[in-house]
Amino acid sequence: MTGATGPSAAQALRVGAALPDPPFEYNGKEGPAGFDIELMRRIAARIGREWRLVPYQGADFNGIFAGLDDGSYDVVASGTTITPGRQAIVDFCTPYCVSGQSLVVDRTRHAKVRSIDDLEGLVIGVQKGNTSQPVADKLVAQKRAANVRVYAYDEIEKALADLSTGGCDAFMKLAPVTHWFVRDRPKLAVVQTGITREILGVSVRKGNGALKNAIDAAQAELAKDGTLAALIKQWLGDGATAP
């Protein structure tokens, strides 16, 4: 899957992303779409390189960073939260937005669940490697929830369906994503946002200062002219803000 024709493959900016993860990245009717897709297309154009999408298909999101070391792609732009553990293995560019975990339930099953304070005896669904996983694990350790059910990263549709069938009782994920998925699921509702405060950004291979600096400069231009804020508003809505 590639972007528009242009410079040779050697000049392409290969962008690793885990799909589907709307509104950050997903395959739309006319091809790849989403916040990270549009942002990286603009950044690639600013630094004079062709944009190329390289889908990551692993079950554990944290496995996506290995592709930077093995040369599968040049950057990871995939709604990625900047964490100390990830900073130890990759270099992050200037953050592009701030978001946080949210909680989704099927209100016909759990009408009284309105926050993480109402999860006693219930099972929380998360995606493997997602930053929601340690949050949910902590709730279980504190005996504020019964268990955590871990889904492969590409099983978000299954996890959401399980909210209604009983496979899990609540699902945790960044707010832009949960708001996107509940739009066409009238039984499901986002009952809490702002569970965490997470800073998101693009990452490059450890030590690749030239590319990091080029992306930082291009992103700074997009922030200055209002493009970054407009993309956040268009794609991420109230679930995220500029840093």
Image (spheres, rainbow, N blue to C red):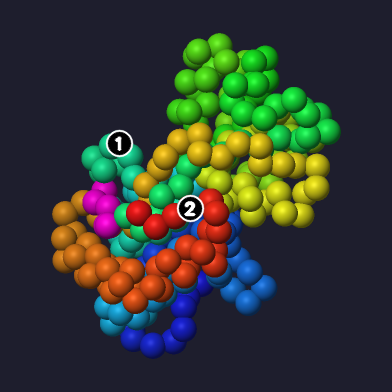
Q: Secondary structure at mark 2?
A: loop
Q: Is residue 60 visible?
A: no
User: Where is residue 186 drawn, in percent x and y?
Assistant: 80, 47
Write down the residue under mark 2.
240
Position above or below: 56 against 164:
below
Q: Is residue 170 visible?
A: yes
Left/right placement of residue 142 relative to residue 82 reads right
In which image quadrant can residue 125 be found? Answer: top right
Q: Secondary structure at mark 1?
A: helix
Residue in the picture at 55% in, 58% down: 237
User: Where is residue 109 drawn, in percent x and y?
Assistant: 81, 29
Q: Which region of the structure is painted magenta?
A: 90-94
Q: Residues within 10 Å of mark 2 (few under 14, many from 20)?
A: many
Residue in the picture at 55% in, 54% down: 238
User: Where is residue 54 drawn, in percent x and y?
Assistant: 45, 64
Specify whether residue 157 is painted magenta.
no
Amino acid type for the residue under numbered disc 2: Ala
Residue in the picture at 28% in, 37% down: 84
Write down the residue under mark 1.
85
